[in-house]
Image (spheres, rainbow, N blue to C red):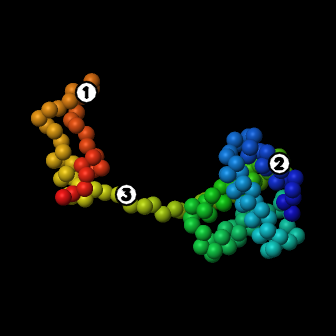
Amino acid sequence: MIGNAYHKGFKAYLQLERSLSEHTIEAYLHDVAMLENHLITCYPDLSVQDVKAHHIQSLLEVINELGLAASSQSRILSGLKSFFKYLMLEEVIALNPTELMASPKQKRALPHVLSIADIDRLFAAIDIVHPRVCAIAPCWKRSTVADLGSPS
C-alpha cells in the first residue's frame, strides 16, 4: 500500500527539510500508519496514487467517532497533509487529496477575568502619593493580584 520506502523518505523529509522535532516526526509517522491501516481495511486494492479526499475523509470520520478532541484531529490532518505534500514533491502523486481539507474548528476557552474584589484591591494598591518617573511617560507602582495577597 504506502510502503516502507515512503515511510523512510517521509521521515527524512521531516527531519531534513522541515526540521521538525523527533516527537512531531513520530506523531506524523503514526498518522501515516493509521491511514495505511484504514486504507488496507476499507480499500484493500487502493494504491497510494489513487487515494482521494473521500478516502481520507472516511478516516477522519472514524477518528471523530472515536471521540478524539478537535485539536488531535487537526494534528492528524496536519500530518497527513505533510505526507501528501511530500509525495507530490517526490512526484509520486499528481494531485494532493488533502489540499482543500479544512481542520476541525477548535473550542475557544473564555478568558479569565478579575473579580470586583480583585479590581478594588488593585486600585487600592496604587501609590498615587509617590509616583515613579519613567523615561517615556509617568507610571505608578505596578501591582498584580498575586502581589496583593489573599483578601482578608
* SS at mark 1 in the image: loop
User: Which residue is labeled 3 in the image?
Assistant: 111
User: Which mark is nearer the camera, 2 or 1?
Assistant: 1
Residue nearest the viewer, comparing 92 with 79: 79
Asked whether, in this view, residue 89 is left or right of residue 21, the answer is right
Location of the N terminus by quadrant is: bottom right
Residue at mark 2 to residue at mark 3: CA–CA distance:
43 Å
Residue nearest the viewer, comparing 150 with 47: 150
N-terminal of the two: label 2 or label 3? 2
Which amino acid lies under the numbered mark 1 shown in the image of this protein?
Cys
Q: Where does residue 39 sit, x and y in percent of width and height?
A: 80, 69
User: What's the mark number on residue 9?
Assistant: 2
Residue at mark 2 to residue at mark 1: CA–CA distance:
57 Å
N-terminal of the two: label 2 or label 1? 2
Q: Residue at x 18, y 42 (%)?
A: 126
Q: Residue at x 67, y 52 (%)?
A: 23
